[in-house]
Image: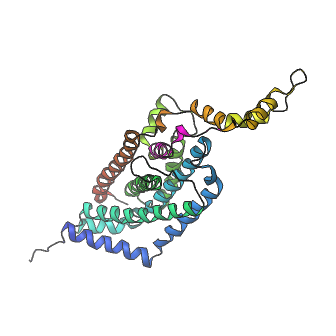
Amino acid sequence: MKKEKHQGRISQFGIYLGKYLRMFVYQNDWKVIPMSAIIAGVVTVVVGSNMFVTQEGTLTGTFALACVCLWNGVFNSIQVVCRERAILKREHRAGLHVSSYLGAHMIYQFLLCLAQTGVTLFVCTMASVAFPRTGIITPWGIVDVGITIFLITYAADLMALMVSCIVRDTTTAMTVMPFVLMFQLIFSGGFFGLSGTAEKICNLTVSKWGLDSLCAIGRYNELPMVTLWNTIFKFKDIEIQGQKPLLDLIRYAQDNGYRDQFLLWSGQYNTKPNYAASVENVLHNWGMIALLGVVFVIISWIALHSVDRDKR
């Protein structure tokens, strides 16, 4: 009998990459692009006006932006492997190389995340988000923000791809997805005071390093804080022995141009080491996101090699 010759890894990679590109066009996978624009538009309308302007606005805005990236990435690939698991199992037994299959997915998702990053930046620009004029790594702040958005989106995409490689059907994948997103958001370290073991768990999340990167690039520690001023203003009418000392203080600061100085002064007492605007800090955060992405790929590769043992 004549020995059958299987396609090599490079040939299989090209075949599968072409397949996913055709699916993008003919099976409406392109819909994730306008969906990204809609989500980014909603977020920027709500929290974009104060992002990179005040500490509170920057923390809220970058957290919301990180949520957009996580949603885009997870939604991209949470079902891509498990929905064709039966086909994958049959083709693997016929000579499919897992590295070619997984590599094609990674390149396709890379291009998809790149397009989503461009759309997100465009929407933010149209919404007049005040991007930093200068970056930490590059000369342009918008480029640094764009790189961070892409890294978060692509790492979340690879995380969802890992889940899709592990689970065996789309129903399970969609059931797991909310818990994956919830885990990322809770352990981002942005809004919830975490300590002990919970604080260490934060280091395992894409959201933590992504949020730290965006705040560092936005120079969070150098921005004014408005919470203290707003709190004082709220109690301006309190009387003490027939006088309103807080109202007098507010009027004095406004009449003499001290309000902005007060906001900067209060911001200096609310700095966070994780948000330091330094090259070392930003590169460290980017490196950790990339490292998590590599871990997700390795786990995906291991999970796909066990597809033949799937008895379902």
Question: Where's residue 209, x and y in %?
Answer: 44, 43
- Specify how the rendered protein is coloured: rainbow
Q: Is residue 249 left or right of residue 80?
A: right
At which x and y percent is residue 153?
45, 56
249 or 112: nearer the viewer:
249
Q: Quadrant of residue 44?
A: bottom right
- Residue at image point 34% right, 46% down: 291
Q: Which residues are magenta?
A: 208-225
| Residue 183 image position (x, y, % from top left) | 51, 44
- Going by the picture, which residue comes out furthest to the bottom? 26
Most common SS among magenta residues: helix
Please state the horizontal and vertical placement of residue 27, each as a whole percent of the image.
45, 76
Query: Of residues 69 and 197, which is closer to you in this image?
Result: 69
User: The C terminus lies in which quarter of the figure?
Assistant: bottom left
Quarter of the image where the N terminus is located: bottom left
Let me know if residue 231 is in the magenta part: no
Residue 213, magenta (yes or no):
yes
Residue drawn 45% across and 40% down?
277
From this view, report whether residue 236 is shown above or below residue 65: above
Q: Residue at x 43, y 38 (%)?
A: 203
Q: Nearer the viewer, residue 187 or 79?
A: 187
